[in-house]
Amino acid sequence: MAVTDMGRGVADAPPKVALLNNPKFRSWLFQILLGVAVAYLVYSGWVNMNANLQAAGVASGFGFLGENAGFSVAQSLIDYDQGTSSYGRVYVVGVLNTLIVAVVGIVFATVMGFLLGIARLSNNWIVSRLATSYVEFARNVPLLLQIFIWYFGVLRLLPQPRDSLDFGPLGLLNIRGYFAPKPVWGDGSAFVLYALIAGIVIAIGVSRWSYRRQMATGQRFPSLWVGLGAAVGLPLVVFLALGAPLTWDMPVLGGFRPSGGMTVIPEFIALLVALSTYTAAFIAEIVRAGILGVSKGQSEAAHALGLRQGQNLRLVVIPQALRIIIPPLTSQYLNLTKNSSLAVAIAYPELTSVFAGTALNQTGQAVEIISITMLTYLTFSLLTSAFMNWYNARVALVER
Amino acid sequence: MTKTVLTGVLGAAVLALGASTASAATLDDVKAKGFVQCGVSQGLPGFSNPDADGEWSGMDVDLCRGIAAAIFGDATAVKFTPLSAKERFTALQSGEVDVLSRNTTWTMSRDTQLGLNFAGVNYYDGQGFMIRTDMNINSALELSGASICTNTGTTTELNVADYFRANNMEYELVAFEKADEVVAAYDAGRCDVYTTDQSGLYAQRLKLTDPGAHKVLPEIISKEPLGPVVRQGDDQWFNIVKWVHFATLNAEELGVTMANVEEMKESDNPSIRRLLGTEGEFGSDIGLENDWAAKAIAAVGNYGEIFDRNVGPDTELAIGRGVNALWSQGGLQYAPPIR
């Protein structure tokens, strides 16, 4: 509005102000000057770096990504062969290892954090004090120290391979890790997957339909149970109809460590526990703040309308608390992901350890590798933010 | 916005890097600041290890002290920067240290791709394996399936990969950033095997709860010539580091020791006279005083003395001279003559 008004004013009376005093021109001028300055800084940094690398005789470029890495990685979610896999593959292995610990850690931290946050508000004195002491301890001890405590603590507790704890059908546990049975899917098991997808689609459809019907007619429909039945029951029926095409590859004791099955290395366990317990303490405080941020009158009004305590929480308190919780929660998720790089201290082979560590040392391509690693963490963080912002927009206050 | 800030920071970091590598004459820098900045390990007994008072000792440390003595006549004119295996080359490339004397293996790729020069070999090593005695394993060839602890960013990772692949054996590698964590994890039983250079195994064994319960397997699976490293493109500094090392070797060969260096200056042997600066102008050719070698030997002794004091049979490490004996005694240590 303001701009068009001003434009009209200018058109009516010929401009008497000097160009330099024109606010629009000035703002553009400074933007452009700043842009040029930044571009020049980046450009001269780039030129200087290349000149120095050349003068120092350091090879540069990204060709090393295709070369044979030749070292082994303790945990890999994709096929990795130490003899033939390239540095590019090492990068992918590192990224996946970072992602798995971050994603699982975020899930654990969120669940623990919500429980702890609610426990801190409990009317039960013992429960709330226990939660408070936990939060204060976990928040105030440096994370690296906690990782060491968990790692060497876990190592001290677990027995040597020959004295493995045997959980029968659940596998073996010893100092070399948790050796779980590995599912081996037989013929036709793809249909089970299709059935699962179909079941989930049906569940979503039912839930949407029942919501619309309830809005229109007020009639309720047990969509949760029907949906759950479709999502679980359909694949189960298909699975049984196919004659249960699933066998388990059990770990067997012998040699230096058990063979067969799937291995969860102790470094992963220690890092996961340390990251999720540490972050859970922060999330607990965020959740507590969110719940306390919803005024008491909201609950009282809900009760006055006849809503039960559960409905009050689900329909009134939590939706409003989420608006307060989501933005700081996003920061905690980003922190957890970035903190996973501390794993380099305990030999968990994530991105910083295998790529910005071993691969950097073997190739000497510091500038390239550190740039790639920084961009990767930046991408993780921006994606997480983007997702959380989208979710935040959904739960944010809608003005009517 | 985030991206703009990031590139700005990157640019600034790069500029800073550029500024420090631009100066080529390391000797002038060193003389101006009055000490040698020496990159060492974070604690490897016998090579570079700080004691309770923070005093560094070891073979790699003595090399740096020898360089400082050759330049300043003062073996204490040196500051030590402890570096992890991962940080060491970047620290040298960026000019943070003047010389890297940190049990670093000389390989072709390090010599040719990193803009660095290896100035000699002050210890011929080879990679070995340590294992608990009660595992009843007597050869590295019985290690198929074992978990192996080691340091990240070292040649040991690659050697062990080559060795196991060549012998068609499986293994699990657990690689830590710092040697202390490797020792702790091996001690706790996380791994069956600890692998690094044999000298390192003997050194780290001292840190275990029960050193007697572990043994080093006989196999040596790699050549690990360890030596000092300098930046490429400064030949004067390269020569100084190289010849300080050679001077200690020549001194041992000629019988010059820390104790007798002063009287040896009056020797009739022309080789000794050239070494100690009584004859010739060898010092000024590398930008130092003519008695540069005499000062270095007076400070740290000859190669044999350095070896015996730090890792020799009378120390806790109890390593024999082996291939590190002088060439004249059947070993590999050989220095070109000073003439």
Image (cartoon, rainbow, N blue to C red):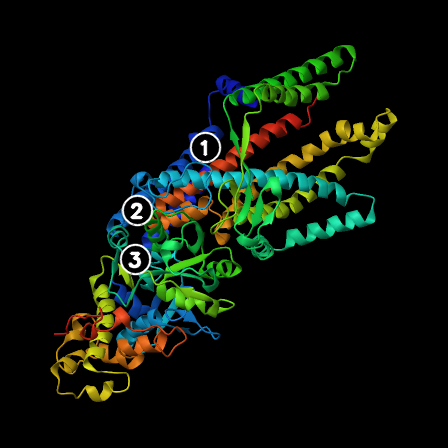
Label 3: chain letter: B
Q: Secondary structure at mark 1?
A: helix
Which label number is shown at residue A170?
A: none
Q: Is residue B39 visible?
A: no
x, y (%) of residue A183? Answer: 54, 33
Q: Is disc 1 surrounded by few (<14), some (14 to 19) or many (20+) residues within 10 Å?
A: few
Residue holding disc 1: A26
x, y (%) of residue B73? Answer: 29, 78
Label 1 close to label 2 by CB (< 8 Å): no
Left or right, residue A256 beside residue A180 = left
Q: Secondary structure at mark 2?
A: helix
Q: Secondary structure at mark 3?
A: loop
Q: Is residue B151 above or below residue A310?
A: below
Identified at 31% across, 38% down, the residue is A66
Left or right, residue A379 beside residue B274 = right
In what quadrant of the picture does the C terminus of chain A appear? Answer: top right
Q: Kindly report the distance in space between the C-alpha atoms of the residues bearing marks 3 and 2.
A: 39 Å
Q: Is disc 2 surrounded by few (<14), some (14 to 19) or many (20+) residues within 10 Å?
A: some
Which label number is shown at residue A48?
A: 2
Label 2: chain letter: A
Identified at 31% across, 76% down, the residue is B306
Q: Amino acid at mark 2?
A: Asn
